[in-house]
Every structure is written in structure tokens, then in C-alpha cells.
Image (tube, rainbow, N blue to C red):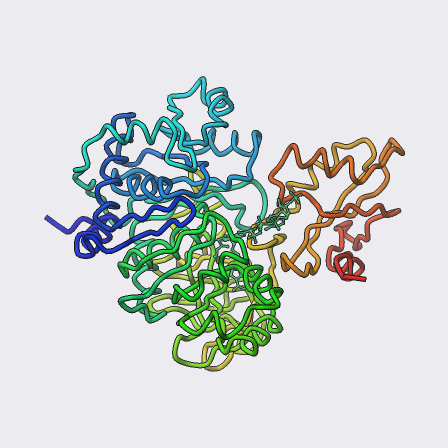
Amino acid sequence: MSENQNLFALLESRFAEAGEQIAIEDDNRKITVSYADLLERSGQYANALVSLGVAPGDRVTVQTDKSLESVFLYLATLRAGAVYQPLNTAYMGAEVEYFISDAEPKVVVCRPQDEEQFAALTKDRDTGVVTLGNDGTGSLAALAQTQDTAFATARRAGDDLAGLLYTSGTTGRSKGAMLTHDNLTSNAVTLHRYWGFVPGDVLLHALPVFHVHGLFVALNIAFLNMSRIIWHDRFDVARVIADLPRASVLMGVPTFYVRMLGQADFGREQCAGMRLFIAGSAPLLAETHSQFAERTGHRILERYGMTETGMITSNPYDGERIAGTVGYALPGIHVRIADDDGNEVPRGEVGVIEVKGPNVFAGYWRMPEKTAEEFRQDGYFITGDMAQMADDGRITISGRSKDLIISGGFNVYPKEIELVLDEYDAIGESAVIGVPHPDFGEGVIAVVTPGTSDAFDEAAICGDLAGRMAKFKVPKRIFMADALPRNAMGKVQKAELRAQYQDSFKGP
Ligand code: MLC
Ligand code: AMP
């Protein structure tokens, strides 16, 4: 019989080898768990999922705070052969409702305080609701405690689904990116090697675990390496700096590095034992890269990736890390810079990044047409990121062909916000754009025209929006204008607006 291709089967072999070594250290709750514990606890959670009716291929939707138990649940879902579907904790009612109706999970795991809301959302479905608190409480945690620790890891083929992560890709409605066991395994194994992980590496983990970066990149690599993970439930700059001397690797979005540089007492001393600082999910300003090098002696290693593809390119570990570039295609991954028809453009010219390899997802959940639109005939996936490739293959991202804003590493789709803004009587039309923001890289703003009512109140509208959608999506400013700039075809000229409003977040 062929080998089990379940990612957990690979992790399990490492967990067994690591035994009593510490896997995760949660100083907040003053608890550590060993690799042997991870095996047992994931076994209990997997048995709990099965007792709730979860079978291989079923989706398990998870909107919980970051906790050790959320890691047990992630591992257990893989182990049971089910499909992990994490949700940003900032998402609210209507946002969440869509994901549930689309993913049709067998079980939803939510925070105890959200149980009623989820029960209402799932009442006409064959979906169970259980809870997980951030301190080991909740009905799922209680159920898991009563379960056997042994669990035979479900057999999975490499192309079976392991994760379903929602993203709007290029435009329009949120789509579930189907990630297979092969996708996750190949990327983790490649990155583990490429970034020179060694026994004894300690990962400082301060990212959320509902996106690719904190979930698959950080956790899967650390587990493969049998590393100790210092676990922070959120990014708190003072705590991160205080724990750096005990760590050797940090992975973060650019905002992490900007905030660290904002601390006067941060410098070489705390970074002396660090081996590697990695940045990604959004562009790292060259200025941040050089200031960090000056202050700490470390050159941040910038890499580039996407939900649909995991990591695609990386600056080299041993070679030159050049600020403002995202490095080279990772081993085994093919990248080309193409024109609108998918033809490779000459080196040095700007085009769209297209990618093919074992890391590339299996398509969008129940959307064959959308999937077909985003792939070329020869299997390359069209990322929507604009870049140029140097003669030696090094890639520099220059922008996006997709209408996407990335704020502090979170994606915001202008269309989604514009549709809501247009509902207000005081607003005629709206354009949502991203402009430079000193902390978040890009800050979301809206430019609107007068509507039928003249009672436009910026603060009131922002406050109202905050009750309707994830906070990070809410425009930090709404500017009233007489009209929106349009081209001859009537399309709003967002580049013009971005230029006009580029100083919105500049200090005095
Ligand atoms: C929080 N706020 C944000 C925000 N995060 N607003 C815009 N953009 C963000 N990213 C809001 C809060 O709700 C709050 O609103 C106010 O801004 C200030 O909050 P804060 O306390 O300063 O923010 P904080 O909680 O510290 O969060 C900032 C952050 C966090 C950068 C630490 O956003 C974060 O962890 N980002 C990481 C995202 C990530 O993991 N991306 C990976 C995607 S995977 P108010 O009104 O209450 O004051 C991917 C693929 C790849 O992209 O390549 O990796
Ligand atoms: P997501 O949909 O959350 O996976 O976001 C993926 C997008 O983040 C990519 O398509 C890029 O636009 C952006 N991104 C990720 N890493 C980088 C990087 N290092 N530099 C610039 N953009 C990046």
C-alpha cells in the first residue's frame, strides 16, 4: 500500500521522534506542551471531531481566538482527514454567514460568546456548533478531554483537501482556495530547507493563525523542525522584543518590523541570538529593511506568497538579500512574468507573475468557471501581482493588477466596501483606495460624492460600518468630493485618486 500522503502523517513521525521536547511555550497561561502532548491532544481532538460526525473530506469551520487548543484542533482536523477552514476573528455576522453557506461545514468551532450567533446561522443545516475559549474552556475542549488519546491518522491522497481558505483572489466574491495535502507538505518541506532551519531553532510566533502566514508557513515549518515555539496570542511589540533573546527565528508582516523600529530601546542587544527575521504578506519598504539592518545588524529576508499558492519566491538565505525585491522562485516552483495573454515578457519588463508547481492550489471551491479564468492552458496560475524579473531570475514586485488593498497584512477588497458605502443616503458614489500608512503600509480610505441627503457625517458612517464589517476593512477616513475622476470609458481613475490623497496619513 502506498504511503499515507496526509500532512499529519509526516508531522506525526517528527512528533514521535521529538517526544518530550517542548513544542509550544505559552507564557501567558504559564503552560508548555511537549511534542508527545501534541500527539495525544490532537488524538483526543480528532476523536472528538469524529464523535461529532466529522468524516474525511468534511469541512471544519473555525473562528476562535489564538490558543494552544486552536493548534490541537488544526492538527486534529488534518489527522481526521477533514478540511480545515479558518476564519479571521474580525469577521462579523454577514461575512461569516457567507462562508458557512458556501463551505457547508459539518462542524463550526467558535468562541463561547459567539455560540448563539452560530447556532442561528446553522439552524437549517446539518452543521454542529461547538465552542473553544482562549483558556482551554468550551464544549469542544470538554468533549476532547473525555476522549482516547490514540487515533489512527486518516489515509489521504496527496490531492485530497487539507485546507479551505477564503480569499477574493483578484476581484469579486470571496472564494474558497482549495489547498491539498501535497500543497502544504511540499511548501513546508521546501521552506524548511531553503531557510536553513536547524535543530535548536526557536520560533517566536506572534501572527494570527487564521491565514497562510501564521498557520501553514510558521507552524508547519516549526513542527517539521521539532522546534520550540514561543507562543504570543497577538502581536505586542514590547513582548516580542522582550522574548527575542530566547528565540532564533521571527516571521512577521512588515508592520511588525515598523513597530519594532519605533521602540527606542530596540537594537543589537536583543537580536544577538537571532538567526533569521522573515517578512512577507505585504511589501516591506526598502527604508524599513535598511533601518532594521542598521539598528540590529540583521538583513530581513523578504519572501512573497499568496493564499492560493503558499510561498512562491524568497530572498536567498545565504546569498544577497536585496531590499525591495522578493528574491527567486523557490526550488521546484516555476515563475514567469507574462503579458495579458500569458506570454512571457523579456527580462526586465513589467508583467503579471504567473506560477506553477506543487504549491499551487487545486482551484476555487465549487467555482470551476472562476478557477478556469485564473489559470492558463498550460497550468500556470495568474497571481494578479505585477513584477519584473532580472536576468538572474530575481523578482521585484512593482504593483498589483488586482484591485486589492493590503493593510497590515490583511486584504481589503474595495468593491465590497464600496457596495456598502453606496447604500448611505448621504453618499452618491464611492471609491475605496489604499494610500501610504506609516504603520499598516497601506491605509484604507474612501472618496465619496454627495448623495440625496446632505447629512454626511464621516464619524457616524465609520462607526456604523464598524458594527457591520471586520474593523480592519473600515475606511480610516472618508473624504467628500464633488465628483470622482473618470476616464473616457467612465471607469473611476483610482491611480489619480491615490496620487491626490497620498498624504492622508502623513504626520503634521
Ligand atoms: C488592526 N486594525 C487594523 C489592522 N489590524 N486596521 C487596519 N489594518 C490592520 N491590519 C485596527 C484595529 O481594529 C484597531 O481599531 C486599530 O486598527 C488599531 O489596532 P492595533 O491594536 O494597533 O492593531 P493590532 O491588534 O496590533 O494589529 C495590527 C497587526 C495585525 C499588524 C499586528 O493586523 C496583524 O497581526 N496582522 C497580520 C496579518 C496576517 O497574518 N497576514 C497574513 C495573510 S497570509 P480601533 O478602531 O479599535 O482602534 C498572506 C500570504 C502571505 O498574505 O504571503 O503571507
Ligand atoms: P493573500 O490573498 O492574503 O494570500 O495575499 C496575497 C497577496 O499579498 C499577494 O498576491 C501579494 O499581492 C501580497 N504579498 C505577499 N507577500 C508580498 C511581498 N513580499 N511583497 C509584496 N506583496 C506581497
Q: Is residue 408 above or below residue 448?
A: below
Q: Is residue 236 above or below residue 365?
A: below
Residue at the top extreme, as displayed: 124
Residue that appears at 87% across and 32% down: 452
Q: Nearer the viewer, residue 505 or 270?
A: 270
Q: Quadrant of residue 453?
A: top right
Q: Quadrant of residue 221?
A: bottom left
Residue that appears at 33% across and 53% down: 184
Q: Quadrant of residue 245?
A: bottom left
Q: Is residue 115 visible?
A: yes
Give the image location of residue 178, x and y in percent: 39, 45
Q: Is residue 340 visible?
A: no
Give the image location of residue 152, x and y in percent: 16, 39
Q: Nearer the viewer, residue 324 or 255?
A: 255
Tell me if 65 is positioned left or right of 350 in this view: left
Residue at the left extreme, as displayed: 1
Tell me if 415 is positioned left or right of 156 in this view: right
Give the image location of residue 430, x and y in percent: 76, 43
Tell me if 414 is positioned left or right of 121 in this view: right
Which image quadrant: the C terminus? bottom right
Residue that appears at 78% across and 48% down: 447
Q: Is residue 298 above or below residue 473?
A: below
Give the image location of residue 150, x and y in percent: 16, 37
Residue that appears at 43% across and 60% down: 380
Q: Nearer the viewer, residue 61 or 155?
A: 61
Q: Nearer the viewer, residue 464 or 298?
A: 298
The tally of labels here is: 0
